[in-house]
Amino acid sequence: MKEVQIKNKMGEINSVVGVDTALNIPYFSWHGYIDIGEIKAACEKMLEYVAKSNADCYLSDNREATGYSDEMTTWTSSYFVPKLKELGIKKHAIIFPSEVFASISTQEFEESLSGYFQAKVFNSPEDAKKWLVDD
């Protein structure tokens, strides 16, 4: 599956969706501010890639994200996350920049998804991928 770039209204790439074929891990990478339309487009592509790859985990890299639409939390929790669970996702690794990683409540984030699948916050892609592939 080829990597897909989602662009904002100004033609700038603000998200990339693909699959690490060596590890069979679908991934997002987010760049800049992402509005709800762009979030939905990227998430729909992620659902497609999860289904096609038969993956049981995925990665979200937020190191270059600067912000999200206020509607994102509501839409992802009511639509996207339940769809991922239906597709068999068991683990979600999310990467934040070091400065954000130090300031967020990782426990609160991880617990917010616990009814759906395991979620864990990381500050490096290597650690995130290792956790996703370890049983």
Image (cartoon, grey):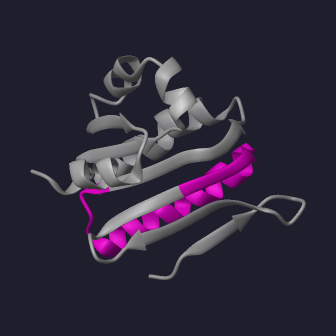
Report the number of numbered marks.
Answer: 0
Q: Residue at x 51, y 38 (%)?
A: 96
Q: Position of residue 93 (x, y in %)?
A: 35, 45
Identify the residue at horizontal 57%, vertical 45% (top origin): 63
Does 22 sit left or right of 79 as displayed? left
Quarter of the image for residue 122 reads top left
Identify whether 37 is placed above or below 79.
Answer: below
From the viewer's perspective, tell me whether residue 7 is left or right of residue 119.
Answer: right
Magenta stretch in the rendered image: 29-57
Q: For residue 54, which quarter of the picture? A: bottom left
As drawn, the residue found furthest toward the bottom would be: 2
Residue 45 is one of the magenta-drawn residues: yes
Q: Position of residue 131 (x, y in %)?
A: 23, 48
> Looking at the image, which residue sits at the far right?
10
Q: Is residue 43 visible?
A: no
At 48% from the left edge and 29% from the top edge, which residue is drawn? Answer: 101
Q: Nearer the viewer, residue 45 or 26?
A: 26
Q: In screen coordinates, is 124 left or right of 6?
A: left
In the image, farthest residue toward the left: 135
Q: Position of residue 37 (x, y in %)?
A: 72, 51
Q: Would you say residue 86 is visible in this rendering?
A: yes
Closer to the camera, 23 or 77?
Answer: 23
Specify whether 105 is left or right of 135.
right
Counting from the top left corner in percent of width and height, residue 110 is at: 34, 27
Residue 40 among those drawn in magenta: yes
Residue at the far front: name it.
98
Residue at 31 percent across and 73 percent down: it is 53
Query: What type of secondary structure mainly makes up the magenta span?
Result: helix
Q: Quadrant of the N terminus?
A: bottom left
